[in-house]
Amino acid sequence: MPNRQPTRRQCLEAIAAFGAAGLLPRHAWAQAAWPSKSVRFVVPFAPGGSSEIVARTTAAELSKSLGQSVYVDNKPGGAGNVAMAEVARADDQHTLILGHIGTLAVNPYIFDKLPYDPNRDFKPISLLAKVPSLYLVHPDLPVKNLKEFIALAKAKPGRLNYGSAGNGSAGHLAMEYLKMASDTFILHVPYRGTGPQLTDLLAGRLDAASVGAPAVLQFIKAGKLRCIATGTTQRIPQLPDVPTVAEQGYPGFEMTQWYGLMAPASLPQPAADKLAAAAAKAMREKDALDRLSNDAAIAVGSTPAEFAAFIAAEQKRWKPVIARAKIKPD
């Protein structure tokens, strides 16, 4: 009889059998078979914000590349600390988390003690997307642009308020950054997530907010919210008539949110490498580019080394801002 070579499927089945029996080293098993089941992609915030859009776009593309379902699991609480601590301890090799400016670059400086270490407990996989921070007011507020808003805030110090998704959130940072640049006093009202905050902003119970573009473009276009400035260095295509903060009297001002894919430090390196390649590829796919572009998000898809360097630079950038603004947790 001819000597028949085993098929690829037969080889993988044999590898799986050896791995299940504990006859293969852990790193070989991870490299050959990861992921072997559905992957849980944790979002450390409530549904309804920019994080939801970036996470679901990424999960859809990763599901195609990895050959296993990647599903989003929102787990809000404690400015993202609850989810970060849980994922840091996860050892099932199939739990990931959406990293964010707040959990990676802000929380280390506003909490006296964190239940996780952003640099030691996680492996940076890929910077997925940057999201323009938009400065918004309710249409009933008698201002048409940032200059008028600042003038009103100076005329009525402490009378205007703004909402955020919580202390230390990107929206909180964005408004405090603006307050510092403009030397104004505007009352902060923290919420538990972007969704609840938007509900009150749309209802007129809040005067202003800074929110990532994907979550609010539809309301701006419908006239339910007024965008008075963007935090980007250049105007965004989706709102070409809205000038940047820098254009309206604050040169050099820049504020964007960012989101990246993180894995527990315990994830074997071969699996992390495979995931990083899939994540970078996901951000180049047409469906992802179209979805993110429609929501004014900017796809990135960096390498792990690039993402690690970016996180370090952001930590260095925000540490003095947080100290000056005296931002503290709830």
Image: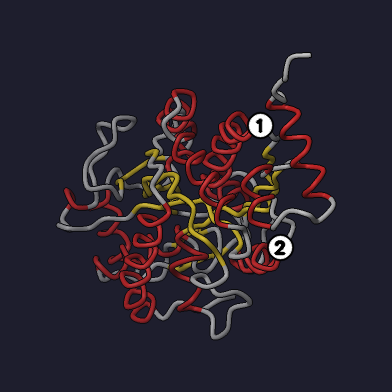
Q: Quadrant of residue 305?
A: bottom left
SS class of the residue under badge 1?
Answer: loop
Residue density around tag 2, few if under 14, some if 14–19, many if 20 or more, within 10 Å: some
Task: Using the rendered view, name the quadrant where residue 113 is placed.
Answer: bottom right
Rendering coords of residue 255 (x, y %): 32, 55
Q: Which residue is mark 1?
A: 67
* Percent x, y of residue 313: 32, 66
Q: Report the amino acid beneath label 1.
A: Gly
User: What is the crowding at mark 1: few (fewer than 14 residues within 10 Å), some, or many (at least 20)?
Assistant: few
Which residue of the protein is positioned furthest toward the bottom in this rendering?
A: 112
Q: Nearer the viewer, residue 129 or 238?
A: 129
Indicate left or right for 314 with 41 as reference.
Answer: left
In the picture of the structure, the residue carrying the numbered disc 2 is 90
Does the image show residue 220?
A: no
Between 99 and 305, the one lying in front of the other is: 305
Horizontal and vertical percent for residue 50? 51, 44
**Left or right of residue 316, residue 86 in this image:** right
Q: Is residue 323 above or below residue 97?
A: below
Q: Is residue 2 left or right of residue 66?
A: right
Residue farthest toward the top in the current orientation of the protein: 1
Q: Amino acid at mark 2?
A: Ala
Left-right relation of 167 to 240:
right
Quarter of image, res 12: top right
Disc 2 element: loop
Extreme residue toward the right, this view: 21
Residue 199: percent from left, percent from top: 60, 46
Q: Nearer the viewer, mark 2 or mark 1?
A: 1
Q: Earlier in the sequence, mark 2 or mark 1?
A: 1
